[in-house]
Amino acid sequence: MDSTFAATNLTLEQQIGQKLMLDFRYYCEQDSEQKCRTAMTELPTDLADVITKHNIGGVILFAENIQSINQIVKLNNQMQQAAAKASLGAPLFISIDQEGGRVARIPRDVATSFTGNMSIGASYAQHGTQFATQSAQVIADELKAIGVNVNYAPTVDVNMNPDNPVINVRSYGEDPALVSKLGGAQVAGFEGNGVITSLKHFPGHGDTNVDSHTGLPKVMHDKETIWQQDLPPFKDIIKAQNPGMIMTAHIQYPALDDTTFVSKDGKTMIKPATMSRKIITDLLRGELNYQGVVITDALDMAGISHFFEPIEAVVNTFSAGVDIALMPIEIRSPKDLAVLDQLIARLVNEVKKGHLDGDEVAQSAQRILQLKSKFKLTTALDESLAIQKAQLILGDSSHRKVEAELALAAITQVKNEQSTLPLKLANKAKIHIIMPDTRKCMALEQAIAAHADSNSNYQFSCTSLQGFEPNATLKALNNADIIIAGNASPNQSAVEIGGMDDLADDPQFSIAKSEQGAALERLLQHAQRANKKTVFVSLRAPYDIAKFGQYGDAILATYAYNIDIDNNVKVAGPAFTALAKVLVGKAKATGTLPVTVSGINNN
């Protein structure tokens, strides 16, 4: 695309097309009553035609769209070719959620995924912004190599709520100044390396105890708290860097806007930030002077879809001043393409009737095209060369080295009584590992065996908190020389769980998710009564140390438990390798807690 490209001569339909970011996660070429679950891994003619016909501005990729490096380069090229044939010829935003840590869409054995933002926060005291910068540069290199040009990162929510079900370790920590510094370093790392960032989730998702994927959270902060806690990272990064995009939050902020709407089931409710003109236009554009592109969080999330019909939701977001509607309607089969036609016709009509401001829509399209020009996005690609290059870049050994260094720099020693660490175990010592699932047991067992002294022939046993036989477990605890117990809190989501292999042997001993914490506490209490030396490991948000830490002679926090390799023989990930090195004394734990844990660092 020519960098002098301007939106002045665009038709209204072209402007609207640029303002849509579509999701083609699944697509079935035949309509059916069944829910379509066929992953879209090569571009069907239907979808290529949609991109061309409507001058669609962008697409979002999910894990389902990515099978291999060759395949994803080809798919992204097919989509850009479809965009090149459109009347506008503007390249697509091809976007993804590749934050690192918990949220990574490219298979972990293929791309470098890192241990996430809270681990970067834990490394800050010792390493400053080093890992924020380096991790962003690496992820940007790998995304660019496969043809992705927008990353929905960094998350600059300030995690102030221990019960936050959706942000927790996706945040750098609870200090707004720290979040600003590390978020700013990641923006520079991504955008300096050619990938557009999207700060999220404006005006802040850090103090919620509801996940906006499943409901509509409400933040009851007064204005002063909002300006002191939630907004500083956005304000600071906008002022210093004007990042390419900012993503809105599906969250009610009554102190910023208490305007109401009537939901589709007739309830009167406060507008979420995504649809609030006071928050998007007056605050973000006006007071914070943001000049870039504003994009919604996914409009199919329950925080929006429970309360609005899809087309109404898009009209409301555009009316608030948002530039791009992300996932405005579900596109799963040919019948949905007719709904997309209706959406575009309705939006054109809303402008013609004066319900949407035509000048604002034109300015919005202009901002989108300016961002594409600024980053020199293009529809031209030498596919075979791109594939060769991507094969070399993704998961490259220098990238994996930075990933391993961050995982180790983050490990935090919270307690170490009676010189429990490093482990001083005799040959053939019995180590009993308690983990959320069997794969994590295997990962830690293999990592300890790999990094312990060669003459230490340890004997391992494992309890999976997904399911275990009580008598055998108590016997293993009583026989153990050391117990290493790991917990992941809040609960793992379905996508992160280790699998059903834990329950295959004896389903009668399966444990409901909600009861796994209680089961862990009972096992730790038994270990304490039996005078067993115990190490407690917080595998995710370290707030669980307040509950389980009392049972550990030593406490460590890892902030992550990624498993990158899992072929049923070898199970490994950077967080487990780093943890094992600290456990056996091959490395020191130098991380610090980036959040307050009751009873530990809240003096």
Image (cartoon, rainbow, N blue to C red):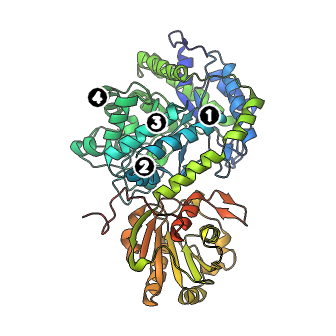
User: For mark 3, what is the residue?
Assistant: 187
Q: Are marks 3 and 4 in contact (CB under 8 Å)?
A: no
Which is nearer the N-term, disc 1 or disc 3? 1
> Whole-percent x and y of residue 204?
36, 44
Q: Amino acid at mark 1?
A: Lys
Which is nearer the N-term, disc 2 or disc 3? 2
User: For mark 2, what is the residue?
Assistant: 127
- Badge 2: few (under 14), some or many (20 or more) residues near its Cα, within 10 Å? some
Q: Are marks 2 and 1 in contact (CB under 8 Å)?
A: no
Which residue lies at the image location 47% right of the left edge and 52% below the top edge? 214
Q: Are marks 2 and 3 in contact (CB under 8 Å)?
A: no
Which residue lies at the image location 49% right of the left edge and 30% below the top edge? 324
Nearer the observer, disc 2 or disc 3?
Answer: 2
Looking at the rendered image, the quarter that the C terminus falls into is bottom left
User: For mark 1, what is the residue?
Assistant: 144
**Which label belongs to residue 287?**
4
State how far apart marks 1 and 4 are (Cα): 33 Å
State how far apart marks 2 and 3 are (Cα): 18 Å
Which is nearer the N-term, disc 1 or disc 4? 1
Corner quadrant of residue 465: bottom right
Which is nearer the N-term, disc 4 or disc 2? 2
Q: Amino acid at mark 3?
A: Val
Q: Amino acid at mark 4?
A: Glu
Local SS, label 1: helix
State how far apart marks 2 and 1 are (Cα): 27 Å
